[in-house]
Amino acid sequence: IAVECATTEGAPTEAPTPLAQHASDDDDACQYVSVSGTTGQTSREGTYERVGECAARPYYECLDCSASDPQFIWYTGSQWFIGPGGCGATVAGIYINDAVGDLAALTGNWAESPFTEEN
């Protein structure tokens, strides 16, 4: 699964810029994030726009996902999540552990929920 910073809507950067650990609206965190390459969660693929903060990290909403419910990217505890739950939820269709909370600097593999795409 590829989750990459994008410089403008739908255009991934060549080298993602790390997100600030404590982001604010005037920092250099990614304004857009592109999600692609899922196998069972394709309705969550698309371009996400930064719409605020969750747990002092950037919070994103999908602009063009095919899921019936709005989709978000958020940080809670020590994990990033992608799904309909939004800020504070701990269940989502796609997730990854990240003790630092830096979305763009992540290494490792995102996991997909074994449930249907709408969970």
Image (spheres, grey):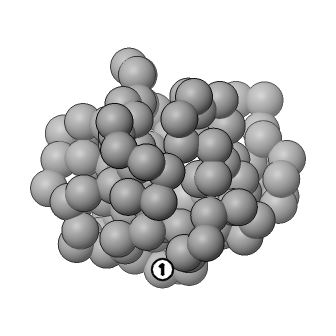
Q: Is residue 2 visible?
A: no
Please indicate whether residue 26 sits to the left or right of residue 95 in the image: right
Q: Amino acid at mark 1?
A: Gly
In the rendered image of this protein, does residue 37 appear above or below residue 63? above
How many numbered circles are shown? 1
Q: Position of residue 18 (x, y in %)?
A: 51, 42
In the rendered image of this protein, does residue 25 appear above or below residue 79? below
Please tell me which residue lies in front, 79 or 39: 39
Q: Which residue is mark 1?
A: 52
In the rendered image of this protein, does residue 91 appear above or below residue 111? below
Q: Position of residue 91 (x, y in %)?
A: 24, 57
Which residue is rendered at x = 14% and y = 56% of the image? 77
Q: Is residue 110 visible?
A: yes
Please indicate whether residue 11 sits to the left or right of residue 48 in the image: right
Instruction: Give the class, few, some or many, for how many residues have Cα within 10 Å of label 1's Cα (few <14, many ≥20).
Output: some
Please tell me which residue lies in front, 93 or 51: 93
Provide the secondary structure element on which disc 1 rests: strand
Q: Position of residue 79 (x, y in %)?
A: 24, 47
Q: Quadrant of residue 58?
A: bottom left
Q: Hey, which residue is sitting farthest top in the picture?
A: 108
Q: Quadrant of residue 30?
A: bottom right
Q: Hey, which residue is sitting farthest front in the picture?
A: 116
Please indicate whether residue 40 sits to the left or right of residue 102 in the image: right
Which residue is rendered at x = 69% and y = 61% of the image? 65
Which residue is rendered at x = 71% and y = 53% of the image? 46
